[in-house]
Image: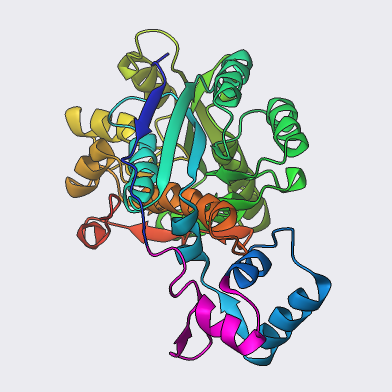
């Protein structure tokens, strides 16, 4: 398990505490001084009303509120948040990963959102957990809680583990955002990721357009550990895929190749044995980000008549796409998911804005011809 990674940004003060903190719907701007003059009260009284502070008489408050209502003012929360000069701490629960993983681009997006808000006092603490070990998730969650975060980004683990942690956050009034996979019944502040069921259904349609009705058997590669797949997202994609197959190709047999990621991860002999035992299979699909495991095997062994469908623009997948050992990839903007997850917390906590709850990434189909136009690591 990697140690926690903590990033603190420099503190930036703003001296423009009162000017232009409230603005009208049009381009006309007004100062607190202007509101005070129209209301017949002091600047200090207006400031207390605007920020809902005590020690204001009912008569004075009514005067100020009447002026605000008459000229249709809306608060400029961005300037107001700067003026408050408060520090905000965000946390993130992310699966442990290597440098070539899908999660690397997610993490870049998380950090870039913090960097782009350098005028605010923001910090991000990331804790990593083993996707196949529930206690690892709980331990990482406890470490986040010790930091007393204002908001948390979560890549959900098993339902019970995720529910237990999110219930604690709700009790403390801490908003949280789900990233990559959703558990809507837990009601996060927001979710960023693909609709995994529709993604799997879409993958089935494109996959079988290539395989054709003559395909009687296909290969479904699954990465396994301790008896289950690596993520909820992959499991849900498979549900959508199997639904499509049952509706449109019920005669097509789905043969599973289960690769155990525990151990030395030398998959060649297992792949060879599977293909030798199923010589009629030529079309393969996987719902994880490691389609390159099969793509590299096909390339290294001169198996040019195999067709492979996978997910995510990780580096090794891209190489296989370029040399056509992978035919199709579905990409899902991991950088944007990370960036927008932190942005949602920022907008909700700091700027007091409403946040859209469900934010689905597009189902983008990439090939050797168009992948170059897709940017996984955005700037």
Q: Nearer the viewer, residue 312 or 295?
A: 312
Q: Left or right of 289: which side holds 298?
A: left
Q: Residue 191: x and y, percent?
A: 59, 51
User: On screen, 61 above or below 85?
Assistant: below
Q: Left or right of 162: which side holds 370?
A: left
Q: Residue at x 32, y 13 (%)?
A: 266
Q: Nearer the viewer, residue 257 or 48?
A: 48
- Magenta-drawn segment: 16-43
Can residue 281 be seen from the camera position used here? yes
- Quarter of the image where the C terminus is located: bottom left
Q: Is residue 283 magenta?
A: no
Q: Left or right of 125: which side holds 167?
A: right
Q: Residue at x 47, y 36 (%)?
A: 219
User: On screen, 33 above or below 180?
Assistant: below
Q: Residue 214: x and y, percent?
A: 48, 53
User: On screen, 348 above or below 232?
Assistant: below
């Amino acid at each position: 398990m990697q140690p926690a990674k903590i990033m603190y940004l420099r503190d930036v003060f703003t001296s423009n505490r009162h000017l232009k903190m409230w603005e009208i719907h049009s381009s006309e701007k007004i100062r607190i001084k202007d509101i005070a003059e129209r209301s017949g009260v002091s600047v200090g009284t207006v400031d207390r009303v605007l920020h809902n502070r005590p020690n204001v008489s009912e008569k004075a408050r009514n005067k100020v509120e009447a002026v605000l209502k008459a000229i249709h003012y809306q608060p400029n929360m961005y300037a107001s948040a700067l003026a408050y000069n408060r520090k905000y701490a965000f946390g993130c629960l992310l699966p442990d990963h290597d440098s070539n993983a899908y999660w690397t681009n997610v993490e870049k997006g998380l950090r870039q959102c913090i960097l782009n808000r350098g005028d605010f006092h923001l910090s991000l603490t990331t804790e990593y957990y083993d996707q196949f070990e529930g206690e690892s998730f709980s331990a990482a969650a406890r470490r986040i809680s010790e930091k007393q975060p204002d908001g948390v980004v979560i890549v959900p683990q098993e339902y019970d583990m995720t529910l237990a942690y999110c219930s604690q956050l709700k009790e403390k009034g801490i908003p949280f955002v789900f990233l990559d996979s959703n558990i809507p019944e837990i009601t996060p502040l927001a979710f960023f990721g693909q609709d995994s069921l529709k993604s799997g259904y879409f993958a089935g349609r494109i996959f079988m357009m290539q395989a054709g009705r003559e395909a009687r058997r296909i290969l479904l590669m699954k990465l396994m550990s301790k008896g289950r797949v690596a993520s909820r997202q992959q499991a849900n994609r498979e549900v959508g895929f199997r639904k499509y197959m049952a509706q449109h190709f019920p005669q097509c047999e789905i043969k599973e190749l289960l690769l155990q990621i525990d151990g030395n991860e030398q998959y060649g002999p297992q792949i060879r044995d599977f293909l030798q035992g199923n010589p009629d299979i030529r079309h393969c699909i996987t719902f994880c980000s490691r389609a390159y495991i099969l793509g590299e095997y096909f390339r290294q062994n001169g198996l040019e008549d195999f067709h492979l469908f996978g997910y995510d623009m990780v580096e090794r997948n891209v190489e296989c796409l370029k040399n056509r050992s992978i035919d199709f990839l579905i990409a899902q903007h991991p950088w944007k998911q990370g960036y927008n997850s932190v942005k949602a917390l920022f907008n909700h906590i700091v700027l007091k804005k409403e946040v859209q709850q469900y934010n689905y990434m597009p189902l983008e189909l990439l090939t050797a011809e168009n992948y170059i136009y897709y940017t996984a690591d955005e700037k």
